[in-house]
Image (cartoon, rainbow, N blue to C red):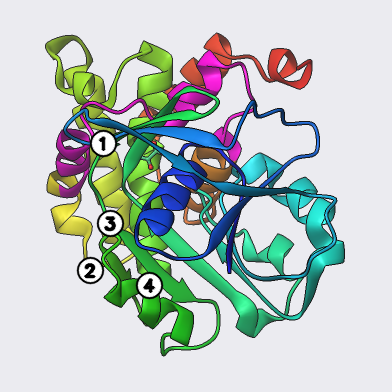
Amino acid sequence: MISILGAGAIGQLLAHKLTDASFECQLIVSDTDKYSSEDWQFCDLDKNISSNQLQSSVYSDTSPLELVFVCVKAPQLQSALDSISHRLGDNSQLVLFQNGMGHEVIAKHFVADQNIFFASNTHGAYRKSSQSLVYAGKGQITVGALTQQSSPQWFNQLAQANTGLAIEWASDIQPILWRKLLINAVINPLTAIHRCKNGELIKEQYQSQLLALIDETRRFAKEMKFGFAEDLKAIILDVIKQTADNYSSMYQDVVAERTTEIDAINGYLLDQMESKQFHAPHHWALWSQFHVQYPPLKRLAE
Ligand code: KPL
């Protein structure tokens, strides 16, 4: 049984795709979440609407959890894992889907190092309402482990199944997580600030800011000696194109007045830039612009 912690856009996308591919899976939702029925709607890439009966369980249930795809956002990671800690045992495995980096520091309090995995997702999806999901851009999911190099059995079963999720294994996940962090650090705050879909970022009015940020990010990636550095502009523009019809996760959070992943993504990046004494005026300007528009105190008052 695959358990999916969090019924946000990516949690629901996984639940639909795994259910369609006949995997036994359940959504683990907070005790306070209210869902009207077991019927969950799905709008696919061709805008066809279907529905699935998705199994769910609340945090406080007692059945043990073996394989957990952790799909809550970075700011909720600690509290969500705290809420299910009574259901985790020595063999429980956590697959962390959060944007940003460094989340193993929290996961290590709950499971052994060899049971921690990371997933880097570039599929785009957003919720139209709590049980209605729009799949808005095909991407892929790359999975890797904190400690081991070879893929576990559950991964092999998933990768071989016809889920349509384009799942791959990476023996070294760190550069993949970095690449995703750098993509998110440009796209997510810009779409939140300009309140637009990913694809609108290439409009003339946003172009100079977008290109300056991409260039600064590319130079940082080069300084970090990432193999993908020279391709970063093409990579980011391609994600914008592939997910043009999507609302980024940060856009969705600011519109719903939820705490965003700005600290886990841009905060982490700026810390790394500072520790390498990398001059990043465009990223600092983006950080300020975001916080002027969405002041932390306002977000704390939620
Ligand atoms: O990861 C994403 C996000 O919104 O967090 C992308 C790939 C940018 C899709 O919107």
**Label 3 packing within 10 angstroms: few (<14), some (14-19), many (20+):** some
Quadrant placement of the C terminus: top right
Is residue 172 something one can see in this rendering?
Answer: no
Instruction: Say whether marks 4 and 1 touch (CB < 8 Å).
Output: no
Q: Which residue is mark 1?
A: 44
Q: CA distance from mark 4 to mark 3?
A: 13 Å
Q: Amino acid at mark 3?
A: Gln
Whether tag 1 and tag 3 are in contact, CB under 8 A, the answer is no
| x and y, in percent, of residue 62 in the image | 85, 61
Sequence-first disc among 3 and 2: 3
User: Whole-percent x and y of residue 222?
Assistant: 26, 59
- Please name the residue that numbered disc 3 is placed on: 140
Q: Residues within 10 Å of mark 1 (few under 14, many from 20)?
A: some
* Displayed quadrant of residue 243: top left
Quadrant of the rendered image containing residue 178: bottom left
Disc 2 vs disc 1: which is toward the camera?
A: 1
The residue that disc 4 covers is: 158
Q: Which residues are magenta?
A: 235-263
Looking at the picture, which amino acid does disc 4 mark?
Answer: Leu
Whether tag 2 and tag 1 are in contact, CB under 8 A, the answer is no
- The crowd level at tag 4 (other Cα within 10 Å; few <14, some 14-19, many 20+) is some
